[in-house]
Amino acid sequence: MADLTYKALVRKIEAKEKALARNAESVKRAAENIKMLADDTASDADALGAKSVDRDSLSECQELAKIIRGVSDNAIRYASMTADTARVAKAAGDQARTTHGGFQEAFDRSSVSGLEKVSRDWFEQE
């Protein structure tokens, strides 16, 4: 980590922001698909009930619908937490750019050579 620069930090944070946002969206889509499966299974259970299928088969189908619905509910909660994590990563990136961007601009404009070798302790105010 000693070689971590502002530019490298910003690149890494931006990559994480994008990856987390993509992941949150993927999980949300998966949760929606699972919810559709739960709805379809519940509908199948209703159709079985209308056909006077034996109670055991009907019960198993209804139980399956409940299990799938539980998976969907948990996936939706996970998607929400993933979206929250993506927002926190974006906030961290915004903070890094806000806090350190000025230093990088000054560094880039400086005509002094060897600044990257100066200890950060030297820049601290007393």
Image (cartoon, rainbow, N blue to C red):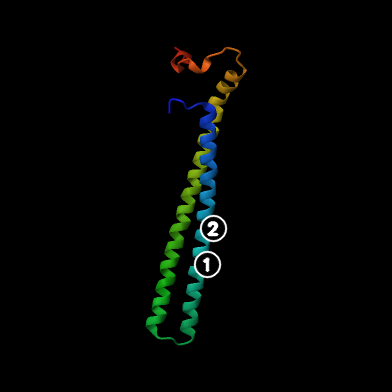
Q: Residue 80 or 6: which is nearer the viewer?
A: 6
Please, is residue 54 above or below residue 103 in the view? Answer: below
Q: Crowding at label 1, few (<14), some or many (≥20) Cα neighbours within 10 Å?
A: some
Q: Which badge, 1 or 2, comes first in the chain's sequence?
A: 2
Residue at point 51% right, 50% down?
24
Q: Residue 30 or 92: which is nearer the viewer?
A: 30
Give the quarter of the figure containing the N terminus: top left
Return the x and y of residue 113 as percentages of the image width and height: 56, 13
Return the x and y of residue 21 as percentages of the image width and height: 54, 46
- Separation of residues labelled 1 and 2 (CA atoms): 11 Å
Return the x and y of residue 98 as percentages of the image width and height: 56, 28
Most extreme residue toward the left is 56
Residue at point 55% right, 43% down?
18
Residues tagged 1 and 2 counted as in contact (Cβ below 8 A) = no
Residue at point 44% right, 16% down?
121
Please, is residue 69 above or below residue 99 in the view? Answer: below
Return the x and y of residue 99 as percentages of the image width and height: 53, 26
Please, is residue 77 above or below residue 43 in the view? Answer: above
Kind of residue indicated by mark 1? Met
Q: Crowding at label 2, few (<14), some or many (≥20) Cα neighbours within 10 Å?
A: some
Residue at point 52% right, 45% down?
19
The secondary structure type at the circle numbered 2 is helix
Kind of residue indicated by mark 2? Arg
Q: Which of the labelled discs sits on residue 114, or is there none? A: none
The secondary structure type at the circle numbered 1 is helix
Q: Residue 120 or 126: which is nearer the viewer?
A: 120
Q: Which of the labelled discs sits on residue 29, or is there none? A: 2
Q: Which of the labelled discs sits on residue 36, or is there none? A: 1
